[in-house]
Amino acid sequence: MLAAQKMLVLLCVGISLAHDSITPAQLKNIEETLKELKRENEALRSFTKDLSDKLESIQADNKAKKVAFSAGLLASGSQQFGPFDTRETLIYQKIFTNTGNAYDSNTGHFTAPVNGVYFFRFYAHGHPSKQMAVSLHKNDQIQCSVFSLKPETNANGSNGVVLSLQKGDKVYTQLWENSWVFDDESSYTSFSGFLLFPL
Ligand SMILES: *[C@@H]1O[C@H](CO)[C@@H](O)[C@H](O)[C@H]1NC(C)=O
């Protein structure tokens, strides 16, 4: 029944009531109308609930899509890192930005919060006479590296890569065995990444 028809029925009911004369047929009609109104009210309520659930999930998705971080190796002071016998994950501790908290300064790992295409870049600085070598990993696979074999004065190396990641994939950098990097308050050695677009 259309809303206008219902209004009409209710209006008739009102008039009948006002004249203190209501027939059984009218009463039945009123009951049916009320039942129908109740059903429509329930349908509307569940529709509104669906909409608000959808809105909530869109808002959560949008929040997960704001992902960008930049970190320097040392939070303060000045230090050589390495050399070690095995490869070691570099744990960058000076956080410049960590929107979305996808980078973990306890592990040095970036964990993709959504499926998407991301850009990463790292920069490494080394001192003379020791090898400087760092690789960027996606899960356990090397993606790109920088290398300088016993530089005469010092060495700078930078590399970057666009990666397609699934939610939960991990990206981090590792210092090679028998290598070192240097950092101080100028943040010569750093790691950055951001989500270009979700997929
Ligand atoms: C590496 O970068 C630092 C900082 O910009 C600079 O002082 C140094 O001269 C660079 N080293 C080389 C070998 O270019």
Image (cartoon, rainbow, N blue to C red):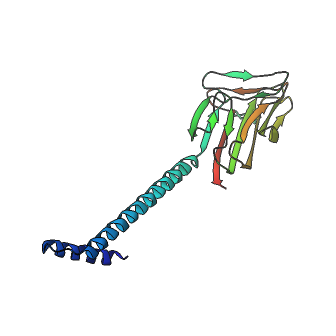
Quadrant containing the C terminus is bottom right
Task: Decide if residue 125 is on the left or right side of residue 176.
Answer: left
Residue 50 drawn at (x, y percent): 48, 57
Q: Nearer the viewer, residue 111 or 193?
A: 111
Q: Nearer the viewer, residue 142 or 178?
A: 142
Ligand 1 occupies quarter: top right
Res 150 quadrant in image: top right
Q: Compared with residue 64, is residue 127 higher up or lower down, i.e. above or below?
A: above
Task: Decide if residue 58 is on the left or right side of residue 70.
Answer: left
Single out the residue that lies furthest toward the front. Answer: 24
Q: Measuring 63% from the left and 28% from the top, which residue is drawn there?
A: 93
Res 45 quadrant in image: bottom left
Q: Nearer the viewer, residue 115 or 27?
A: 27
Q: Measuring 70% from the left and 44% from the top, which residue is drawn there?
A: 120
Single out the residue that lies furthest toward the left. Answer: 19
Quadrant containing the N terminus is bottom left
Callout count = 0
Residue 48 drawn at (x, y percent): 43, 58
Residue 73 drawn at (x, y percent): 67, 29
Q: Compared with residue 48, is residue 21 higher up or lower down, i.e. above or below?
A: below
Residue 92 drawn at (x, y percent): 66, 30
Q: Compared with residue 91, is residue 196 higher up or lower down, i.e. above or below?
A: below
Res 71 quadrant in image: top right
Q: Compared with residue 151, is residue 66 higher up or lower down, i.e. above or below?
A: below
